[in-house]
């Protein structure tokens, strides 16, 4: 149980996928203009991550390892992620057209989001035979991304009202804020020692 | 060999399984769409220029369906596209006058004076941050940084003699250059109009004379010449009222500094047959 808690805290804060490992920066900047869409994106990524982690765990341990074709792991993971993202996209289009439109191109791009594939490859390496830790790690990665994107979105919403010097308007100031956030998150390093 | 077979079988099997799942999901989560939406999107130019005020052609098509945008709102497609959309929707479309962007400055490097040499980046906003709002002595004139040139996705803006110029035929009136110009020099004019004031200066005649050979000096010669009251001087700058203008060209001939010009910046010396009354 301690291990579960430690893995969770470490992926959300200490090794935050966005702010400490610099993965998934494309949607991080792409849809962080509003807190609402940021939350939607975070939720979609977390959902895909948890589902993909479970499916990939099953595929790895019950198909690839017994058949001794583990070298196919990456391509199978990509296949699984792509399929799950497609289902999520279809579902969102039906259930929440507004969110579907505001996420736009970034929704199908979850397929190529490096957080998803990154967390799953780390799962395959570190938590090969531990289902619970795999899921917790994936959920932590997704929630860490959600946390980062919501924080950045709220900062950017505030920046909208500020008098930003012309050369820094838009993306440059977002990059500067994200850099400062990353520095702040460095404060978590050393919090957990395994 | 068997490993290859097993690998192929596993990947193929998974692909097939996911395909079935996705097929089922697509059926289950199917969204009914207005078939006219696809038809309208296809009829549009799909250049996604944003000239209609919507982010892309598909958004514009949706807006037409919702009644939020007029069917003739696409500046790029003009009457043809409007008519095509009209047939899809079964409505009459209004006639629109094709517009083009026009740069209200003719004071190129050879015709105007400069306060200093600008050697910074090719961007008008950057050039304007410097002393006196740019190197040009005329505070209203084209800086020639090429911001509109970069903004134009249709290759309709040419840089000539250090200032920008619009190609009448290539321009689709998307309006990107209008917002790109920090001096607010660019204005939409009817495509067929043949009388255009190529100056943006609100300075008095003496000041304009001192810094530009072709600037409007607000002498009101055009105002006096025009029989139709279609050209008037406001704020020391001549302005054409295209509702009244008949393209007779009397003001073009009379303008002392030659700041009123023909379409395509042709000067009065290049005699061209005038077109009759513009619609």
Image (spheres, rainbow, N blue to C red):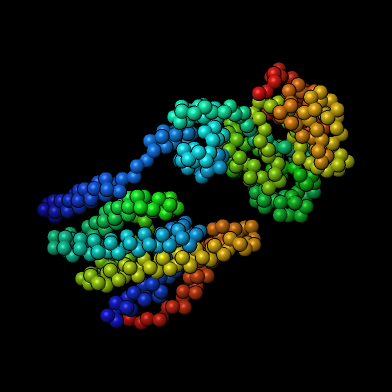
Q: What is the residue that sits farthest to the right in this orientation?
A: B206
Residue B67 vertical position relative to residue A113 in the rendered view, above or below: above
Residue B272 location in percent, x, y? 71, 19
Q: Is residue B114 visible?
A: no
The part of the image, by quadrant, that contains residue A64 is bottom left
Residue A25 vertical position relative to residue B33 in the rendered view, above or below: below
The residue that appears at 23% across and 50% down in the rendered structure is B21
In the figure, is residue A48 to the left or right of B83? left
The residue that appears at 54% across and 62% down in the rendered structure is A157
Residue B174 vertical position relative to residue B120 in the rendered view, above or below: above
Residue B255 location in percent, x, y? 82, 29
Residue B237 location in percent, x, y? 80, 38
Residue B208 location in percent, x, y? 84, 41
The residue that appears at 20% across and 61% down in the rendered structure is A59
In the figure, is residue B45 to the left or right of A65? right
How many discs mark residues in the rendered view?
Answer: 0
The part of the image, by quadrant, that contains residue B246 is top right
The residue that appears at 50% across and 59% down in the rendered structure is A34
In the figure, is residue A47 to the left or right of B171? left
Front residue of A109/A99: it is A99
């Amino acid at each position: 149980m301690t291990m579960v808690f430690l893995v969770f805290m470490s992926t959300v804060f200490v090794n935050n996928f966005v702010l400490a490992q610099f993965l998934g920066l494309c949607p991080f900047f792409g849809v962080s203009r509003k807190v609402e869409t940021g939350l939607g994106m975070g939720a979609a990524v977390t959902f895909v991550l948890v589902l993909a982690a479970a499916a990939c765990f099953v595929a790895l341990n019950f198909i690839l390892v017994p058949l001794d074709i583990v070298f196919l792991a990456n391509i199978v993971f990509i296949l699984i992620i792509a399929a799950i993202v497609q289902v999520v996209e279809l579902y969102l289009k039906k259930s929440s057209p507004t969110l579907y439109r505001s996420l736009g191109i970034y929704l199908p791009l979850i397929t190529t989001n490096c957080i998803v594939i990154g967390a799953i490859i780390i799962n395959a390496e570190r938590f090969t035979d531990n289902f619970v830790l795999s899921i917790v790690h994936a959920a932590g990665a997704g929630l860490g991304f959600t946390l980062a994107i919501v924080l950045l979105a709220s900062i950017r919403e505030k920046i909208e009202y500020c008098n930003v010097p012309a050369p820094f308007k838009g993306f440059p100031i977002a990059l500067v804020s994200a850099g400062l956030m990353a520095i702040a998150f460095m404060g978590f390093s050393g919090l957990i020692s395994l | 060999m068997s490993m290859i077979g097993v690998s192929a079988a596993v990947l193929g099997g998974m692909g097939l399984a996911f395909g079935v799942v996705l097929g089922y999901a697509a059926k289950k989560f199917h969204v009914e769409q207005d078939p006219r939406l696809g038809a309208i999107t296809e009829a549009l130019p799909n250049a996604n220029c944003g000239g209609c005020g919507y982010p892309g052609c598909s958004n514009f098509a949706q807006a037409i369906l919702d009644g939020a945008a007029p069917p003739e709102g696409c500046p790029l497609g003009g009457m043809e596209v409007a008519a095509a959309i009209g047939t899809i929707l079964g409505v009459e479309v209004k006639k629109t006058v094709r517009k083009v962007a026009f740069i209200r400055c003719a004071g190129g490097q050879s015709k105007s004076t400069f306060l200093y040499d600008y050697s910074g980046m090719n961007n008008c906003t950057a050039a304007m941050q410097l002393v006196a709002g740019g190197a040009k002595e005329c505070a209203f004139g084209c800086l020639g940084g090429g911001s509109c040139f970069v903004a134009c996705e249709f290759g309709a803006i040419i840089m000539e003699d250090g200032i920008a110029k619009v190609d009448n035929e290539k321009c689709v009136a998307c309006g990107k250059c209008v917002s790109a110009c920090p001096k607010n020099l660019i204005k939409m004019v009817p495509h067929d109009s043949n009388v255009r004031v190529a100056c943006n200066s609100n300075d008095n005649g003496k000041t304009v004379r001192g810094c530009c050979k072709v600037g409007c000096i607000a002498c009101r010669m055009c105002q006096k010449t025009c029989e139709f009251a279609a050209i008037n001087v406001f704020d020391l700058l001549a302005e054409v009222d295209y509702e009244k203008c008949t393209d007779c060209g009397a003001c073009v001939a009379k303008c002392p500094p030659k700041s009123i010009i023909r379409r395509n910046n042709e000067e009065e010396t290049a005699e061209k047959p005038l077109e009759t009354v513009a619609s």
